[in-house]
Image (tube, helix red, strand yellow):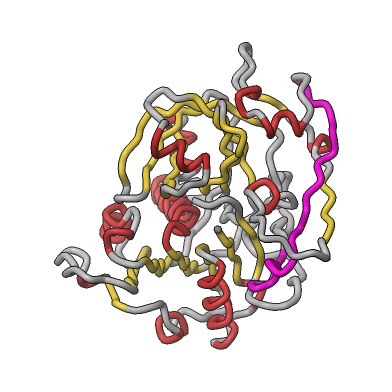
Amino acid sequence: MAAGAETGRGGRDAAAHGPPPLSRDGAGAGRGRLSSRDAAPGAGGSEDCQVIMAHATIYVGFTVPQLLRGASRIFPTHSALVVVRHSDFCYCTVNSTIKSKRKMDHLERTANNFRQEVISQAKVCGITNESETVKRLRLAIANKDFTFKAGQWVDFFIPGVSVVGGFSICSSPGLLEREGILELAVKHTVHPPAHWIHTECTLDSEVALRVGGDFFFDPQPGDSPVKLVLIAGGVGINPLFSILLHIVDLHGYQEGKGNGYKMGTVKLYYSAKNTSELLFKKNILGLMNAFPGKIMCHFHVTQQSSQICKELQPHVTEGRISEKDLEKHVSKDTLWYICGPPPMIESISKLLSNIGVPRNCVFFEKWW
């Protein structure tokens, strides 16, 4: 969980050119390049980027700024969704010459990212503790046309809370198709949306969601097989776990139908302070056992003080993810997806550059 995300390609100082394989444009209109806001790790932060929203009327009679200031206004009594035209969002970015200590919120950080046109109502139908600091929400989606790609996030609107949250989806598109359910795993912070989830959210609480993001894995049946290396830090596991679950669905569809996209191997490297902060670890171990040789995972812990349980011991290394860990996976048909805090993204991106990974094969999402 974080207040905002930055999506890009490669660990470099210039935007990459040419379409990446196996990705469709954010609007989902056929094949095309990944519509990411290319940004070099380490860029930004020295100057604030102010986002100006132009006033424009949407179908239900609000202006966009009114919609974003008052989340409680997005719930029409007669509909499960609000439609927002792309033209209603007129973003203008201005680089400030004065340094500011004010942190940009989720909407500002993601102003140039793709967003769907629809805001959909959802009801909380499950709450569990994924760890001591992370709650996992199950949300029933009322809108039957609601869709997302594995790796994307949602704008999270809460009645009575003026700040809009931004949380990566941790479930698969397949779960949404089968059960109408979407899941989020949110770490407790003082940020109002996260604080609400941990202190006020209950079963049957109503919220609203809008899908966005340019960081996703969405292969099509005719695409050439690729191998994936997923690298996660902390709660950066969320979008990568969604991708991992989507890959499981792809394997199941291919084995059951004998057609569809043929997935290559997947290797997950997941780093956290200690094993108690490794989210979804039991699920991940279960997937490894269900798909031996196809899905592999190695956990890394950097501040482990207690003994590691026997079940996890074969899969855990104490220390950070290293060049030695990753260099064995370098190949022309491997894609690299990274999600975590900015310092980790910068470190891993530099490491991948050092071992010869092509820039256009690296995709990252920074979370604050």
**In the image, which residues are magenta?**
38-59
Q: Is residue 250 visible?
A: no
Could you tell me which residue is drawn at 61 percent across and 40 percent down? 211
Residue 318 falls left or right of residue 161:
left
Q: At which x and y percent is residue 181? A: 44, 33
Could you tell me which residue is drawn at 62 percent across and 29 percent down? 71
Could you tell me which residue is drawn at 39 percent across and 68 percent down? 271
Q: Quadrant of residue 286?
A: bottom left
Number of residue marks: 0
Work out whether residue 89 or residue 16 is closer to the camera in this orientation and state it: 89
Q: Is 56 inside the magenta-drawn segment?
A: yes
Residue 350 falls left or right of residue 68:
left
Q: At which x and y percent is residue 38? A: 72, 65
Q: Is 195 inside the magenta-drawn segment?
A: no
- Please say if 43 is above or below 171: below
Residue farthest top in this picture: 78
Q: Quadrant of residue 166?
A: top right
Q: Is residue 84 visible?
A: yes
Q: At which x and y percent is residue 130? A: 32, 47
Could you tell me which residue is drawn at 47 percent across and 59 percent down? 236
From the image, give the main secondary structure of the stretch colored magenta: loop
Work out whether residue 298 or residue 195 is closer to the camera in this orientation and state it: 195
Q: At which x and y percent is residue 73? A: 65, 22
Quadrant into which the C terminus falls: bottom right
